[in-house]
Image (cartoon, rainbow, N blue to C red):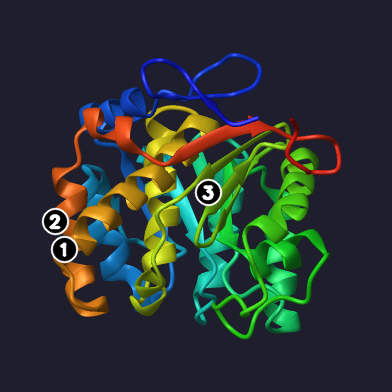
Amino acid sequence: MDTHDAGGWPRDDAGGTVDLTAVWAALAERRPLILCITNRVTTQRVADLLLAAGASPVMADNPHEVAQMAAIASGVYLNTGLHETQPASLDAAAVAFETSAVTRVLDPVGIGATAYRTGVIGNLVRRVRFDAIRGNAAEIAALSGAGTGTRGVDAGAGDTAEGALAAAAGIARERDTVVAVSGETDVITDGTRVARVGGGHPWLARITGTGCALGALVTACVAASDPWAGTVTAHAALSLATDRAMRQASGPGTLSVYLLDALTALRPEDFAGADVRVGTLDRAGAAGD
């Protein structure tokens, strides 16, 4: 059952609300420092979006300093581009997590594309309990063992976020985490609850690094709140900003610029208009009534 309370905040079937406004306000107040170990091709996009949202990015992926950076950061975002030196950085982060409670979020980019990539990411997930994991439908299916993965960083035409819900719920329960699946309608679950966030647009897939930047935004919002509310809020924020940017954009290039402007202008009270529906799941990962 998808419901909202009288104030417009998404309400889950257990009677609790997801206060998106409070999370966005906390993000602005705390300005969390987010260490990003990400794809080299998306570094600027990730940093720009974090700055637009009010967080502070640090793009330090040298394995010799990752542990020290993680110790001072509010959150650490791991995006598995797997350029030559990144596996050592991922390992350094995993070691740092053993003695730190810092927020940690994973984007298993391209898992399933090669045996090497799948092995590195699988080992990382076994070593680290992540607060949240974000990916497209093909990546989440591959991470769960239910799919073969991607042709790089893209989901196939037949891969949908809704179709990956059962896989996402299984990962969430097994790994005690929140799993988000990007799509035309984003699907987010902690294995018990499910949130659906509308507002996606096909042009987002034509802007390099949008998904990577969303993962970093999830990290910032979680660091400012908690894994469930933070992950839902990050997706709602990108959705609201995209909707506003689309009023001016004429294509992916202008959308890329206007998206940062819209995110910068986003205020806590704007979340009353977010397209977010929250409900519960049965044990098979299907939405309950």
Q: Which mark is residue 258?
A: 1
Give the side of residue 287 with respect to residue 56, left or right.
right
Q: Which of marks 1 and 3 is in front?
A: 1
Q: Is residue 278 above or below residue 116?
A: above
Q: In this view, does 37 lie above or below 82?
A: above
Q: The N terminus appears in which quarter of the rendering?
A: top right
Identified at 37% across, 49% down, the residue is 217
Classed neighbour count for the residue bearing mark 2: other residues with Cα under 10 Å, few (<14), some (14–19), many (≥20): some
The image quadrant that residue 12 belongs to is top right
Label 2 element class: helix
Classed neighbour count for the residue bearing mark 1: other residues with Cα under 10 Å, few (<14), some (14–19), many (≥20): many
Q: Which mark is residue 105?
A: 3
Give the side of residue 273 with respect to residue 170, left or right.
left
Q: Which of marks 3 and 2 is nearer the N terminus?
A: 3
Q: What residue type is labelled 1?
A: Tyr
User: For this rendering, which residue is in front, 39 or 147?
Assistant: 147
